[in-house]
Amino acid sequence: MKKRRLPLGIQAYSKIREENLVYVDKTERVYQLAKESAGVIFLSRPRRFGKSLLCSTLSALFEGRRELFTGLAVDASDWEWKKHPVIHIDLNPANYLNGAVALESVINMYLDGVAKKTGVQLTDDTMSTRFAYLIREAYDKHNEKVVVIIDEYDKPLLDTINEKEIHETLKNELRGFYGVLKSSDEFLRFVLLTGVTKFSQVSIFSQLNNLKDISLNPDYCDLCGITQAEVETCFEPEIERVVAENGLDRREYIDKLRRFYNGYRFSKKDLTVYNPFGLLNHFDNHGDFETYWFATGTPTFLIKLMEAQKIDVLDIEKKEIAFSEFRRFDVENMDALAVLYQSGYLTISGYGGSGLYTLDYPNEEVRAAFAESLLHHFLNGGDDRSSKAVIARALMEGNIEEAMNALRTIFASIPYGIQLKDEKYYHTIVHLVFRMLGLFCLSEVQTAAGRIDSLVETRKYVYCFEFKLNGSAKEALEQIDGKEYLLPWGGSGKKLFKVGVSFDYEKRNIKEWRVLTG
């Protein structure tokens, strides 16, 4: 079976079409967006989610390059194939720790390129003045309104978030630059800004009172990303190749693919999408289930933010957040959960009305990889990889003794300088180990009789853990039995394990454990 060419790392729409690479037709949504004419449109999506390809597609559409859209949805629409002057700026490829010099260099490079293309002679002036002049002159020369597309508008601010002085300088520069869009409104046909985060209205968009944020709009929830239906139709050859090469059951494989990479949701509408980067890499690597998207970035800043705001790792799933929190982001006023959502580490899992959204991990890739990053942070790098593999295998085989001994090895590897202060800390480490291994693990599970510290469920077994720092394993086990924590799983047909665990504060490790079955 011939392997098709996938657009790995390619964000230029024209190249994808001209070189006949695999393309998921999003032009019906792009057409819908392009018809929008009111104000400045803003779209927030996590990194590597197709924002740059969207910007490139819109550029080609507004440039009237109909030959690139042959056979696609927009080609059969009533789109007027006019050639508009397009100012397309991508703020991603630069190091903004150099401050205003780097920002001006990048923006002026794009302005000069568009000026040359449109026949406008720019003078040496500030980037904001040159931007305003280019818009007006391009409009006059071509007698068509101008399209402005700015991709990764927030990259300079995110890069300098820990450098307050540089950050403030760039914020002031960008405020003036984006302010040009308001004063140039009569010359503009369409304006789109994309980014990961939406900095608050007062900090950078203070002059854009006509900003239309479509980030949570159900009409555009699948504008970026790939739906399950699109995967099973557009990537049928890739699916068949992976199934054939690995001897898999097709339905079981697709179900695992969905659990591992699907799950991102961006509105009230109950529709989820895949991150394109992870999906394409999975197919290109013969169906290997690796953490492709997660590996492209580090959540160190977010973990520190969670720590500063005392976000409980055990309580990060199924968290409710108000609609207003999605729209508030600034250096002095960041909500860790909202930032985790905007960055792609959490996603919408439910909408309960009254403007409240429930957040959770999007899929197994993020759940396991983020748990590993958190564990690495908690242990300051002092973990034991071989012991983790032992735990996963032992729990899958029902060997609780081997799993507990491996857990003791992990605790023994923690650097002595780390203070294990309370029972919660030990509990958190155990939970993160289970999560990192991809096990189905719930913590602080509420039952009719009380709250289970940790519950792990495999295909054949259910493990109920109760932890004690100032107590004995016997007391922990008696609590599980006395409160009948495992009663709801009595009819599951799985073997039940009750595991009482006590920790030794002085030795900073598991002191003892006791196990009952049935």
Image (cartoon, rainbow, N blue to C red):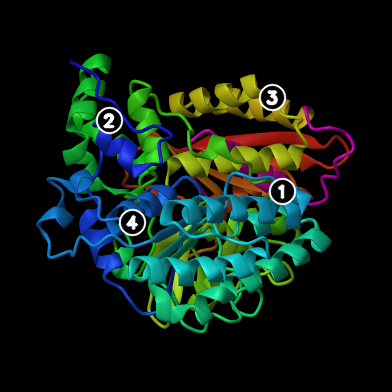
Residue linked to disc 1? 468
Residue linked to disc 2? 19
- Looking at the rendered image, the disc whose residue lies closer to the viewer, 4 or 3, is 4
Q: Position of residue 333 (x, y in %)?
A: 70, 72
- Indicate whether residue 69 is drawn in magenta: no
Of the residues under marks 2 and 4, which one precedes in the sequence? 2
Amino acid found under the numbered disc labelled 4: Leu
Residue linked to disc 4? 58
What residue is rendered at 59% in x and 42% in y?
A: 371
Number of residues whose C-alpha sits closer than 10 Å to that of mark 4, classed few (under 14), some (14–19) or many (20 or more):
many
Amino acid found under the numbered disc labelled 1: Lys
Q: In the rendered structure, which segment of residues is drawn in magenta?
A: 413-442
Q: Name the one closer to the observer, 26 or 228.
A: 26
Report whether residue 446 is seen: no
Dividing the picture into quadrants, the one containing residue 84 is bottom left
- Looking at the rendered image, the disc whose residue lies closer to the viewer, 1 or 3, is 3
- What element does badge 2 sit on? loop
